[in-house]
Image: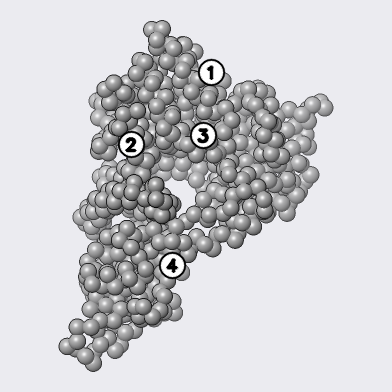
Amino acid sequence: MPDNALIDREISWLSFNYRVLQEAQDKRTPLLERLKFLAIYSSNLDEFYRVRVAGIKHLLDDQNESRSARRLLKDIQRTVSKYLDAFGHTFWKEIKPLLEEEGIFIVDEKNLTTEQEKFVQEYFEEQVKFFIQPGLMAQGKIAHFLKNNVLYLILQLSNKNKPNSNKYRYAFIEIPSTQLSRFVEIPSAGDTHYVMFLDDLIRFNLPDIFIGYTIKGIYSVKLTRDADLYIEDEFSGSILKKIRKSLHRRDIGQASRFLYDGKMPTPMLSYLQTCFNLNAADMVRGGRYHNFSAFFRFPTFNRSDLLYEPMETLNISEIDEADSMFKLIRKKDLFVAYPYHSYNYIIRFLNEAVFDRSVTEIFITLYRVADNSQIVDALCRAATDGIKVNVFVELKARFDEVSNITASERLTEAGANVRLSIPRIKVHSKLCMIGRNEDGVVHYYTYLATGNFNEKTSKIYSDLAIFTYNKGFAKDLLKLFDYLMNQNESVQFKNLWVAPFNLRSSVENAIDTEIESAKAGNKSYIIMKMNSLEDPKMVNKLYQASQKGVKIKLIVRGICCLNPGVKGLSERIEVISIVDRFLEHSRVFIFANNGDPKIYLGSADLMKRNLYRRVEILFPVENPRIKEIIQKLIDLQLSDNVKARRLTADFSNEYVKKGKKAIRSQYAVYDFLKAQKSNPKPK
């Protein structure tokens, strides 16, 4: 492949996160929702440093990789710095003035009225002071440790008894933002509201703590640490014990980013760098405030006009009116699209199984479950009632390890047959299968989805799912569960594309079919929707198809290492990305297939990890009506000219502008689904 064939994965991800920032910049986004997109941007960037940057830094010790790793870190820093400047401008120059026009004022310690000062002092004494533990720093004498992702104020102090001295002491204070709200509402009258960062409320009261000193400056900092657990992911030993033992390391890992107030004096910054044993690659200039993810919890003051209008969940009449989901699924496949349709249908599916005396067994994979999960509740009830419940729980789902451990323990206690993570691989597929004894024969009813069994994320993630009585699917899934539960590796699949077994070769074969069709002069096309496209072999395969005349349209939310529109390489490939109210999470693969289009849904992105190191499933959609619906949903997304961006190698993220009629696909999808005969008016 030519030098420009592959776009760097990390820079592509940063470009995706900028698309999130664009939602905060978009004047069409409701004002308080714009703050939430700042929160999403900040939270995403924190995870990027904890995972991706931390991993790159480990390569600095590898003689063969250190040079390219160092160059990449510089590219990342340069890109992040540019985007952080845009982030700061968006908040301070665009959003904050608009909040003030709406009567919402974010005040700091320097612009309080006398009455507000009194409140701030009283609030500090009654609510905050208990958590404040100031510490003086002594370079070279005490090993100071900063907690992961915790906010600190660093103070530059001079001795009041030595006013002419130019020697400074330094002190630090942890901001108790995990114990207290980051935003303090200051009493106000009428429709005017005042809000103060907890950081600034503490700043105001610090002179009363450092009585013997003059405070010359106060600057905020935050240290982000490596989040990898580095477990020995081998076949020997308990994976549960290994993960439990490793979880505490997450908060004491190697530094991956030291975020500091850009106004901090250079000598002070150098002092901190030495004191905390940081290197130049760790240092990232920021603003006065960090952890903007706190904006998820910014007070709304009952201003619903500054939020998205509620989008009522659509119910599916044929399911609502059915006495039994099993009887209905036996007759026809059922399709649900989240968050537009109610998530209650999968919960009902499991609850019906609990009370159905014909049900003999349940199979399910769990990757990320909600706290207080109704899914887990139903499975526990089923196991307690004597149904054989087989659950594969993936403990290695990053940042959900504790939640998944808790779920696995509840299920085990209830009597379920629980299997935990497989060494060197993650189980990312989303499937549930229920077996019923009907006239002495066990029949299987299956739920296959693109998203997790998670009631919370189902409200904000856009995913697709199908309930089916497909016997071919059931046969393949029984083989898959035999592999998951018993480690039987001699497994072959006939109806499903399953990684790491036949998924890659199946996708490649489907692409080859389109190439041969194009060579023969027949209509050929490929449409793919996914979260990320990163695997070099798959990228190259798509380039080959483009060069042979296949038209390719891609919808990629996040990482895209393919460079579209390059003459002689990819001129028949178009790539868009949609970032909007809901997080696009479904994976859809459509092939022209010589005039008989094939549509696959599933959990897999075209990334090396998904193809080689994860258990993933892509399944064919066989019901003609459901195929029509999915094609319509994809057509609406490809027609989006409001929230779609065109992906190019220059990372410009320009909005797609085509057609006279505005099409915002997420809202158009909702309207389309609402109009379907199977959906009554929202209740």
Q: What residue would you read off at disc 2?
A: 7
Say whether residue 638 is left or right of residue 327.
left
Disc on the earlier residue, 3 or 2: 2
Name the residue at the bottom extreme.
Answer: 161
For badge 1, the amino acid type reads Pro
Say whether residue 469 is left or right of residue 524.
right
Disc on the earlier residue, 3 or 1: 3
Q: Which of marks 2 and 1 is in front?
A: 2
> Percent from the top left, x then y, of residue 496?
59, 26
Disc on the earlier residue, 4 or 3: 4
For badge 2, the amino acid type reads Ile
Q: How far apart are marks 2 and 1 (CA)?
A: 37 Å
Q: What residue would you read off at disc 1?
A: 624
Q: Nearer the viewer, mark 4 or mark 2?
A: 2
Above or below, comparing residue 683 to residue 82 in the picture: above
Q: Which residue is drawn at 67% across and 53% down?
A: 237
Residue 118 picture quarter: bottom left
**Secondary structure category for the residue under label 1:** helix
Name the residue at the left extreme.
Answer: 164
Q: Residue 147 carries which label?
A: 4
Q: What residue would you read off at disc 3?
A: 611
Disc on the earlier residue, 2 or 1: 2
Residue 534 picture quarter: top left
